[in-house]
Amino acid sequence: MKKKKLSLLLTASLALSIGLMGCSKDDNKAATDKNEKKEIVLWTSMTGPDGELVQKNIDQYNATKPDYSVKMVKMEGNAFNNKLATVARSGKGVPDVALIASENVSVYQSQGVLDSWDQYIKGTDIKGDNYVKAAWDVGSVEGSQYGLPATMGSWVMYYNKDLVDKYVPGAADDGIITYEEIEKAGAAAAKDGIYAYGFSWPMQNFSNLYMQMGGKFSKDGKPTIDNETAVAALQEFKKLRDNNWMNKKGEDTTKLFKTGKIIFMPEGTWMLNTMNEIKDFTWGETFTPQWDAAKIVQGSGADQFALLKSKERSEVKTKEAVKFIDWLRGNQSEWIKSGANPTALAMLENEDYTKMPQSFLLKTEQGQKAVTIITDPGYSYIFGEVDTNAWDMIQGKLDIKEQLKKIQQTVNDKMAQ
């Protein structure tokens, strides 16, 4: 599940080659409404249960009998990226709309294969004020909107309310759990064989704490990970592991949490259906653990609707696509049942959504401002290297400072290729 979500959260795709050749707007030989099929083709890498939920929303839209219906074409991640690269080179067979990861907007735009939405959304309710700011901003490049936000996936935290009441009563009352509170819980629960912290996906845990401590993934336009902040973040996890307050490598954190052996488990919003299987205790969902309760940072990714340059798509069809995206602003109840959050603030008026546990992230200005989406150059390389090496550093098999220097050099080498 985590690998399938990688493109949703924080990992840049290198699917389009540097040599991609874009088509100018003059090359967009638009078919007329009369000649083209009245159908908007949407490409996405959302498959499985997630894709089925999106399809339900599309079916609802098509049931309103729009002038142009929407047809979703689902592909696995690699096939999706490869096919996008192929059609972008030719400008033919291009989908009317593609749902791409937030960090890919600037990559594709820099390669000249995206058209701007600006002229099509002018005068509509699709505008920055109506969306979560971070999700809207990531689609903006050089003052134009090349991506329109769909939904957000976030690295949040699930917690066992019964165990919180037993070991750190009141800690969750403000909706913010700090590492200080986690350490306190660990000291109290260790004697009973209960872990305070569930450490599953290394890079997600690390990147959130690193940013909370003030860490940046780029400096002067170049990737950076060999720094004291990164050392401090990894040392915090090592402290949790050394004190037996955190699970060991190889242990199934989800299973441990579901069986009442973990108090706090950072995980993705996409784990909602798994959490709903729990019947033996009451659980909650809130921000990922915070280093400083006064400065909340919430790592997220926001999929974006994008227009690849096409010689075939008409302006009429693009305007109809805008109508579909506008309709979605207040009608994503099915799409988000997997745990994702909407990006459109209109969904705050949707009672079905506001009852969902993940809605905490949008219900307050504090939550919306906490949303942080990483698009730094080279972040995908940092992500992969830290993900591979984190456990060995946490367990003391590798010296943290020395290994971060090696990771930095590896990232530099990859960037230079």
Image (cartoon, rainbow, N blue to C red):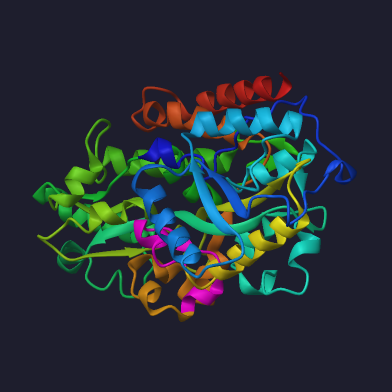
| Residue 343 inside the magenta-drawn segment | yes
| Residue 181 inside the magenta-drawn segment | no
Q: Is residue 168 left or right of residue 175?
A: left
Q: Is residue 176 left or right of residue 44?
A: left
Given residues 164 and 340, the one toward you in this image is: 340
Residue sitting at 44 percent across and 60 percent down? 59
- Regarding residue 268, the answer to whether it shows in the image is no
Choose top left, top right, bottom left or bottom right for residue 392: top left
Q: Position of residue 194 (x, y in %)?
A: 15, 49
Q: Position of residue 91 (x, y in %)?
A: 75, 35
In this rendering, the count of numbered labels is: 0
Choose top left, top right, bottom left or bottom right for residue 19: top right
Q: Report the span colored magenta.
A: 332-348
Compared to residue 262, the image places residue 337 above or below, namely: below
Given residues 102 and 242, the one toward you in this image is: 102
- The quadrant of the rendering that contains the C terminus is top right
Given residues 155 and 161, the one toward you in this image is: 155
Compared to residue 319, the image places residue 104 above or below, namely: above
Compared to residue 347, the image places residue 49 above or below, namely: above
- Regarding residue 249, the answer to whether it shows in the image is yes
Given residues 12 and 336, the one toward you in this image is: 336
- The quadrant of the rendering that contains the N terminus is top left
Residue sitting at 90 percent across and 44 percent down? 26
Determine the residue located farthest toward the front in the rendered image. 34
Residue sitting at 25 percent across and 46 percent down? 245
Q: Position of residue 214 (x, y in %)?
A: 59, 52
